[in-house]
Amino acid sequence: QVSASGMPVVALNFYGGGERVEHRGIASVPGEERRFYESASRALDLGTRLGTKIYNPMFGIRISGTSASHQLETAVANLQLVEPMFAREGAVLALEALSGGRGFPLRTGDDVVGVVGHLRTHGVTGIGIVADLYHLSVNGTDVGRFLRENVDLVAHLQLADAPGRSAPGTG
C-alpha cells in the first residue's frame, strides 16, 4: 500500500530495542550485536523494496554499569559491520540527537557530530546526521550555526517547530 500511495519513504529507523532501552536503539548496547545486525538486515530489505536511502541505526541510551567508551566501541563495531550492506544499495546511515528521556548520549548537535566524526575515522564513511530541528533546538543547539558548520554531514533534515513539535512557524 505504501508504494501504491506514491508517497516516498525517505528514511527508516532500525529496531528501537524495547522498554529496557526506552526504544532508543541498540547500536551501542553490548550484548545486542546479533539483534542489531538482524535489525539492519530487515530495515534494508524493507527499505530496498520501498526505495528508501536513509536509515537511522538508533544509537541507544547509556547502560548502567557499562562505560561510555565501551558503548561507543560497540557502536563502531556494529556500524562497521552493517555500513557496507547499505553502501552497496546506495544508502546512508544517519544518527540523530534526541530530546526527552534519560541517559541518551546524543542530545546536541555537537554530540552527534562528535560520534559521526569518530565513526568516520574508524572506517564508517557512509554515515551522516538526521538534523531534526525540534530535538536540536529544545536541547540547546544553535540550529543556524549547527547547519552552517555541518551541512556536509546532514543526510536528512526534519522540520518541526519548537516548542510544541508542530508545523514550522507555529511554536
Image (spheres, grey):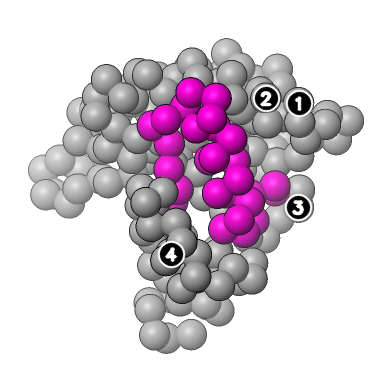
Residue 107 visible, this orientation: yes
The part of the image, by quadrant, that contains residue 108 is bottom right
Using the numbered discs, state the Cα–Cα distance from disc 4 to disc 1 in whole angstroms.
Answer: 29 Å
Whichever of callouts 4 and 2 sits on the residue coming sooner in the sequence is: 2
Q: Tag 1: residue type? A: His
Characterize the local packing of mark 4: few (<14), some (14-19) or many (20 or more) Cα atoms within 10 angstroms. some
The quadrant of the picture occupied by the N terminus is: top left
64 in the magenta segment: no
In the image, 161 versus 147, the foreground residue is: 147
| Image point (31%, 25%), residue name | 87
Give the residue pinned by disc 3: 102
Disc 4 residue type? Leu
Foreground tag (3 vs 2)? 2
- At label 2, the amino acid type is Glu
Alpha-carbon span between mark 4 and mark 2: 27 Å
| Callout 4 secondary element | helix
Residue tagged 1: 70
Q: Are marks 1 and 2 in contact (CB under 8 Å)?
A: yes
Outermost residue, right side: 65
Residue under the point 53% across and 40% down: 116
Residue on which the image places disc 4? 147
